[in-house]
Image (cartoon, grey):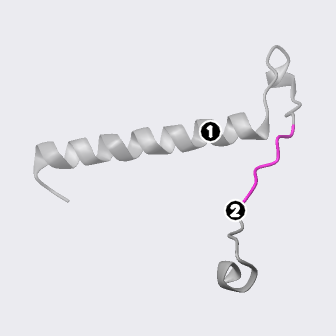
Amino acid sequence: MHKEKFGRTIYAVLPEITLQSPKFVSKNLTTKWFTNRVKGRFNRCMQNKDLSEDRTGRA
């Protein structure tokens, strides 16, 4: 809809904010790093789910 009206598509931009916490004292972590970790964990989980369904024959 936006592309039809303005000729381009809008994409979400993830702000790169430095996370500050006593747990992260020795690491320089950002919201981008955290998001990539969560997305990677989710993708691995979904791959494992697909593999287990293939072995059991159940959906």
View extreme (top): residue? 26
Left/right placement of residue 56 relative to residue 42 reads: left
Left/right placement of residue 20 relative to residue 57 reads: right
Name the secondary structure under disc 2: loop
Picture residue at 78% right of the left edge, 28% below the top: 29
Whole-percent x, y for residue 3 in the image = 67, 78
Whole-percent x, y for residue 15 in the image = 82, 47
Q: How many marks?
A: 2
Left/right placement of residue 50 relative to residue 38 reads: left
Quarter-of-image position of residue 45: top left
Badge nearest the viewer, 2 or 1: 2
Name the main secondary structure of what is drawn in magenta. Answer: loop
Assess whether mark 1 and mark 2 are in contact (beta carbons under 8 angstroms): no
Quarter-of-image position of residue 30: top right
Q: Is residue 25 above or below residue 57?
A: above
Whole-percent x, y for residue 25 in the image = 85, 18
The residue tagged 2 is 11
Question: On residue 45, which mark appears?
Answer: none
Q: Amino acid at mark 2?
A: Tyr
Quarter-of-image position of residue 38: top right
The residue tagged 1 is 36
Q: Amino acid at mark 1?
A: Asn
Cα gap from disc 2 to disc 1, whole angstroms: 17 Å
The boundaries of the magenta stretch are: 11-17
Categorize mark 1 by other alpha carbons within 10 Å: few (<14), some (14-19), many (20+).
few
Left/right placement of residue 15 relative to residue 11 reads: right
Please check the rendered image and state whether residue 36 is part of the magenta-colored stretch, yes or no.
no
Location of the C terminus (image quadrant): bottom left
Categorize mark 2 by other alpha carbons within 10 Å: few (<14), some (14-19), many (20+).
few
